[in-house]
């Protein structure tokens, strides 16, 4: 019976998608649509783990808020490196597919679930979502939703939560950043890197060392104190400037950078791992890249940490929110960050805006490390025709063909750079 129910549900969904394909909104434009009595919406769907061909834009039934939830008409969604790793299935305990990716968005409250207080229909908000953010409408518990300032755009709001909360938590909650300290941050041109640089500028006399690809240096040179090419011997460069090393290392790369980061720490310094992007070397998950990256990680000896007075830590915002129940702590951090935004001390850096139908191209830009700041999926943006043709719903035969062409497509991609 269960199998029969699944097959029936899949058949119904296929009928909805087939009917929806006749609507002009498939290629862009917002708004909801009806099929019979059911409202539907556009959403990015990950059909299975793997390459870019696993993503498509289709129509799904519109969610309704449950008790304690808010329904948000989405205007913009944040795109993060973790989304790329989710697409590949390159995370611990990945969820079942098909799924709608995305963990943050901004928009307007459209409906309130029971027992929701403090919000009204029409409020402009930004929110964390435990998947499902890349859609025209999302529902998420009220504890993950925050009102946005009147002068903050929806694209800025979608670029705000993940990057700035992550940067703030690492600097101030984990590493206890204070006046006169020094920080080394990798991927200084990315969304978190730029947030780290801005937050460091709010504390007097903080020295920021950053690594980034050379082509980004001109654009971000004013945001950090010392900037190095990510492929250079940055350890020696840092020690040439500061013989003792640095107080804080923020590492989103992993691999051999872990050992390098620990070697650069001053006594009482803190090394924080918050990502492992070096494991991503191709369009699909690679066991070899995974094994190589972890093989390069220097084995941490607790006795050595004790003798050298060093701290090693890890940070995952999504786990803190959705698995460890720290939404109250995060709300306090968001309040502080909004205060800094209102004082014009911080401002999200938006790299570019992409339509939902352009999600493949946007994700490729992150893969190629081409972005400076945050990539945003603009739900109301009209896609470029060539991009839309590549990212919207395809036939089953077309998907099978793409699967077989995945390897050759990888070879034609731009070089993998940071």
Image: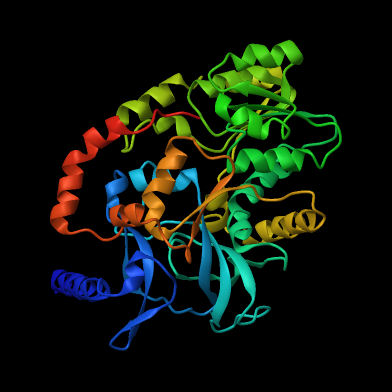
- Nearest the viewer among 4 and 409 is 409
Quarter residue 174 falls in: top right
Residue drawn at point x = 72 percent, y = 66 percent: 149
Left/right placement of residue 109 relative to residue 63 reads right
Residue placed furthest toward the bottom: 37
Residue 362 vs 181, above or below: the answer is below
Give the number of marks.
Answer: 0
Residue 33 vs 79, above or below: the answer is below
Q: Quadrant of the N terminus?
A: bottom left
- Nearest the viewer among 112 and 300 is 112
* Residue 362: percent from left, percent from top: 43, 47
Residue drawn at point x = 41 percent, y = 59 percent: 383
Quarter residue 195 falls in: top right
* Residue 217: percent from left, percent from top: 63, 28
Left/right placement of residue 57 relative to residue 302 reads left
Q: Does residue 300 show up?
A: no
* Residue 313: percent from left, percent from top: 61, 34
Residue placed furthest toward the front: 385
Residue drawn at point x = 42 percent, y = 25 percent: 293
Left/right placement of residue 150 relative to residue 373 reads right
Quarter residue 392 falls in: bottom left
- The chosen color scheme is rainbow
Residue 159 vs 150, above or below: the answer is above
Q: Does residue 373 show up?
A: yes
* Residue 4: percent from left, percent from top: 13, 73
- Nearest the viewer among 104 and 292 is 104
């Amino acid at each position: 019976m269960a199998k029969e129910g699944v097959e029936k549900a899949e058949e119904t969904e296929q009928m909805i998608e087939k009917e929806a394909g006749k609507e002009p909104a498939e290629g862009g434009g917002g708004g909801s649509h009806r099929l019979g009595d059911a409202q539907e919406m556009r959403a990015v769907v990950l059909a299975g783990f793997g390459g870019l061909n696993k993503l498509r834009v289709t129509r799904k039934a519109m969610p309704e808020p449950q008790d304690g939830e808010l329904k948000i008409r989405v205007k913009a969604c944040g795109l993060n490196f973790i989304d790329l790793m989710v697409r590949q299935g390159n995370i611990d305990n990945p969820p079942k597919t098909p799924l709608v990716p995305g963990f943050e968005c901004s928009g307007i409250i459209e409906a309130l679930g029971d027992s929701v207080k403090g919000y009204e229909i029409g409020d402009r908000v930004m929110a964390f979502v435990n998947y499902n953010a890349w859609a025209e409408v999302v529902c998420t518990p009220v504890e993950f939703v925050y009102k946005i300032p009147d002068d903050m755009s929806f694209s800025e709001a979608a670029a705000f939560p993940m990057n700035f909360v992550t940067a703030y938590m690492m600097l101030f909650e984990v590493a206890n950043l204070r006046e006169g300290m020094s920080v080394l941050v990798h991927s200084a041109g990315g969304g978190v890197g730029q947030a780290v640089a801005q937050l460091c500028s709010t504390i007097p006399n903080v020295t920021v060392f950053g690594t980034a690809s050379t082509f980004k240096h001109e654009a971000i040179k004013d945001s950090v104190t010392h900037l190095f090419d990510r492929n250079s011997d940055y350890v020696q460069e840092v020690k040439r400037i500061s013989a003792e090393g640095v107080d804080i290392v923020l590492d989103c790369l992993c691999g051999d950078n872990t050992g390098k980061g620990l070697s650069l720490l001053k006594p009482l310094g803190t090394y924080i791992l918050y990502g492992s992007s070096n494991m991503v070397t191709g369009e699909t998950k690679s066991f070899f890249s995974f094994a190589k990256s972890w093989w390069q990680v220097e084995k941490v000896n607790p006795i050595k940490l004790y003798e050298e007075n060093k701290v090693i830590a890890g940070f995952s915002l999504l786990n803190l929110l959705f698995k460890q129940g720290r939404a109250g702590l995060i709300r306090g951090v968001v309040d502080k960050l909004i205060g800094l935004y209102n004082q014009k001390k911080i401002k999200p850096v938006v790299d570019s805006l992409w339509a939902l139908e352009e999600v493949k191209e946007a994700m490729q830009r992150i893969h190629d490390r081409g972005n400076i700041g945050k990539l945003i999926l603009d739900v109301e943006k009209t896609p470029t025709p060539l991009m839309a043709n590549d990212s919207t719903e395809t036939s089953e035969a077309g998907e099978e063909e793409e699967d077989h062409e995945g390897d050759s497509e990888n070879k034609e991609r731009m070089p993998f750079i940071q």
